[in-house]
Image (tube, grey):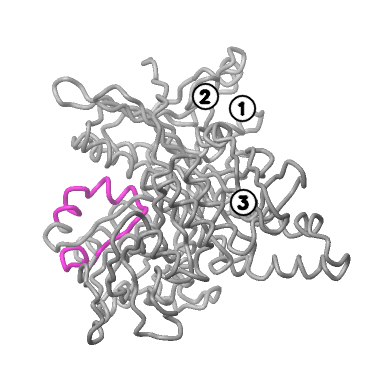
Amino acid sequence: MDQLPHPAASPKRLCVLKFGSSVLETEGDYAAVANEVYRHVREGEKVVAVVSALAGETDALLNQGMRVGGEQPLLLARVARTGELHSAALLALALGQIGVRACTLDPHEMGLVAEGDPLDSTLTGLDAEAVLAKLELHDALVVPGFTAGHATHGIVTLGRGGTDLSAVFFAARLDAHRVRLIKDVDGVYDQDPARNPLAERYAQLSYEEAAKASAGLIQPKAIQVAQQRDVLIEVAAMGSAEETTIANLPLVKSLPLQRAKLRVALLGCGTVGAGVMTYLLKRPDLFVLNRVLVRSPDRRDQPVLYTDSLAEAMTGEVDIVVETMGGAHEYADALCDALRGGTHVVTANKAVVAAHYDALHACAAAGNAKLLYSGAVGGGAPVLEAVGRLAKQPGIVALDGVVNGTVNFLLARLANGWSFDQALAKAQELGFAEADPTSDVDGHDAAYKLSLLVRDAMGVALPSDEIPKDSLRSVTAEAILAALAKGQVLKQVSRARLLPDGKVEASVRIESLPGSHPLARVTNTENSVLITAADGTVHEVHGHGAGRWPTAASVFADIMDLQRAAPCQRSAPTAGSGVVPLRMSV
């Protein structure tokens, strides 16, 4: 058996995202914020997410404290900060649901300290090593804004807009390449765009100009710290393709984009499709949903219309077809027709892409359309995105991974003494396994994924049916006990090696791995892929690979990429405005 590589400690780009109460208005907003964080994770960034309390919660806490005890700043600060602590924990939970490795730290756990008035302090210190150590093991770290420790007072808050200050301070101390302040507007305007639709937006500003132009939008202390430490600030809306950049830059105005509303045909409303539909319905400003294709259209569980007619589901000028029906061949022709006609296709169906890879890509090229299938490999783990980046430079020579979350879940239960039937029933109950588990259990699902990875990573056509594979049905209780006795665990390992002659050697095997190995530490429905680049570095991509929300989040991220790239018109400049139209489409 080949010796699997261990990932090298290669630093990733770090960005800080700030989410204030203007975008965290209700409990339901945590899912949207989690998707925004995932957008950056799949682009190869580590993320520190700084969050406020839900809208109105801090005021409610302060008012409650005043009613109970009157004006006692030291104690009021302790009451007020609980909203942020609560919010940070909830966002970490929302990230975990969609498969992002996330954790949260309270101020005392990361040495975050401040000086000054208990209700309006200024940050002075951070244990950067403690924060970076957490980020070595996680893709996102969620921290509460607005609050910190204090040498004398114990607990303090940072004043109105203090989460802005927290975000900029983290970016400065962690040497992040940017801090992005997510607001309810898509940048800084010369007037309130909610009151004046002709307000002009700044594309970029100096710190001095931003301090004047952003009054009431960005905390002044945050801009001061950014200027002192040369921190690049972006001000943007959720999911936006544009922002206002604040740095040592000359003032430039741009016309705001009028974002396109795209028509979506959703084929399938099962485990993944229902999750995708939920995300689409939450953005009626961006998407119009056709009748949803299902096998039994008489269902009434969602505020949409269903159909069992493919033609009806595809009616109208569809911009995006989202396919979650499954199967290698049934909808291949429909997807090819859509792509050939210029309609983008997003799918999590690894079988259809693996079986019709050349035809689908040829149709996409002919129709100048996009074929996106991030959810087909790894679920919430952005494996294909990492492969795409590394395949360009320096190239990829090997892949080793656990890419089937269902099998990983089953093996974990078998190791705990469950029977195969008990483990399978539990996986089906939790939505990890299909009613017919053959594809997962017999290795076909992993082979489909490995075929796609090999094609995207190494440019070699390797049909999935030519990849040798082991069935989970062959695993005996004796094999499990033997592995445990040696301190090892059984994993379904997918491997591929680029050979000197340009061919690829690949397999999907049940293997016994040392407990210390990175792939041995992958638990339950998690996926992990080790990508060995041509320069010898090893890059690990990790996330949840089974279940509704991780895969649906990946599919929706593809949809949002298409939405941001859709041709958009800018508002016509008013006479004498001096506005510079930076570009007419994205």
Q: Are marks 2 and 1 in contact (CB under 8 Å)?
A: yes
Labels 2 and 3 touching (C-beta < 8 A) = no
Name the residue beneath numbered marker 1. Answer: 415
Q: Looking at the picture, how far across and down is residue 68, in whole percent?
A: 88, 67
Q: In this view of the protein, can residue 241 be seen by the observer?
A: no
Residue type of the residue flagged with mark 3: Thr
Disc number for residue 479: none
Q: Quadrant of the C terminus?
A: bottom left
Q: Nearer the viewer, mark 2 or mark 3?
A: 3
User: Residue drawn 52% across and 17% down?
Assistant: 514
Instruction: In the rendered view, tell whether residue 125 sits above or below residue 189.
Output: above
The range drawn in magenta is 338-362
Q: Is residue 341 magenta?
A: yes
**Which quadrant of the structure image shows residue 196?**
bottom left
Residue corresponding to mark 2: 490
Q: Secondary structure at mark 2?
A: strand
Residue at image location 59% in from the left, 39% down from the top = 126
Q: For this rendering, which residue is in front, 216 or 98?
A: 216
Q: Which mark is residue 122?
A: 3
Mark 1, residues whose alpha carbon is within 10 Å: few (<14), some, or many (≥20)?
Answer: some
